[in-house]
Amino acid sequence: MDTNSKRIHYFHADASALGGVLTRPVNEIIPLQAPLSLSPAGGHAAASANGGDFPFPEIIKFDTASTQVSGSLSPKPGHGWTTVVTAVVEGLNVLNVVTADRVVAQISTDHPLEGYDPIVTFLGTEIDGLKIGGSPVDVDFDLGICDQGKPGTYPSGPCVSDKAFLSRAAEQYRYMNDPANLPRWVTDRTIPDWIKQRYVWNSAQVAVKGSVVCSLVKGTNGQFGGRPFANVCDVPNFGRVFLGELLVDCKSYRLTMIRLELGCLADGDSRCATANINGHTQP
């Protein structure tokens, strides 16, 4: 903590490796794995979990999970308060349909000494060894979706109000709703109603809500038993897989690397490698 600073920064970051809820075959909460929050004063903390202790191995299992949070005043001249949050899951296996060797969500922010809006980066975020139905699926990332202005310069306003960011997010919605963007191997080229209903871009609504749901994933490469819609994989007799889902609002970024809407032998909603970051400077 810099006691000579004219301003004080309240840090905010939290992470969890795995969590959710099941409604079938059992109606149970999936307990959070390695949940962690950063003190408003900053500092550093870490947590871990062993997959051998997880209560639903027949549905979801993993080898190891870990989270880290840290926050401090940067020693670099001209830089402000830096925050980093990381969530990692290794050896993920969901019903032997969705598997991944390593899933990492990582967000870092740099809040300015003067001003309020941070530089945000997602370096270190990755999904390694993803398979759906045993078929390898490569993930195409756009880690710069929240970039504002010139590299290394602090933005002049919140990301959710930035025209370039809003344009990139709107393009993701348009891409998902265009059947021409489905790969050649997909025979059913109709866009499901749930895509049309959820992913409708409305600039006026975004302005009122002050938040945007988008993704760090532009698309996937690799044929599997289902259909890909940008960052979403619709898998028959299993459910929906959402990759790199990012919720941006006026002051925070919430990243979930794999979100599952299960609709098969097991029903429920599960989230893998979630990181949330924020922060407030006064005055």
Image (spheres, rainbow, N blue to C red):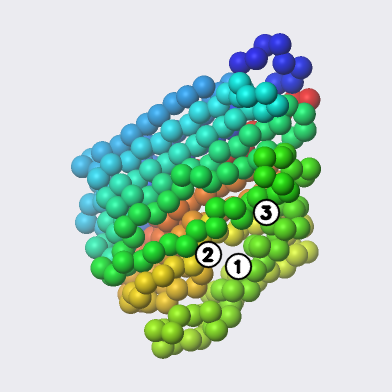
Neighbour tally class for label 3: few under 14, some 14-19, many 20 plus, Cα within 10 Å: some
Of residue 33 and residue 188, the one placed in the foreground of this image is 188
Is residue 261 visible to us here? no
Q: Residue 144: x percent and y percent?
A: 59, 53
Q: Which quadrant holds residue 223? A: bottom left
Q: Quadrant of the C terminus?
A: top right
* Kind of residue sitting beneath label 1: Gln
Question: Taking 203 as reference, is 27 above or below it?
Answer: above
Q: Secondary structure at mark 3?
A: strand
Which is more N-terminal, label 1 or label 2?
1
Residue carrying label 3: 211
Q: Secondary structure at mark 2?
A: strand
Of residue 243 and residue 260, the one placed in the foreground of this image is 243
User: Left or right: 65 with respect to 217?
Assistant: left
Q: Secondary structure at mark 1?
A: helix
Pointer 2 with pointer 1, Cβ within 8 A? yes
Is residue 121 visible to us here? yes
Which is more N-terminal, label 3 or label 1?
1
Residue carrying label 1: 172
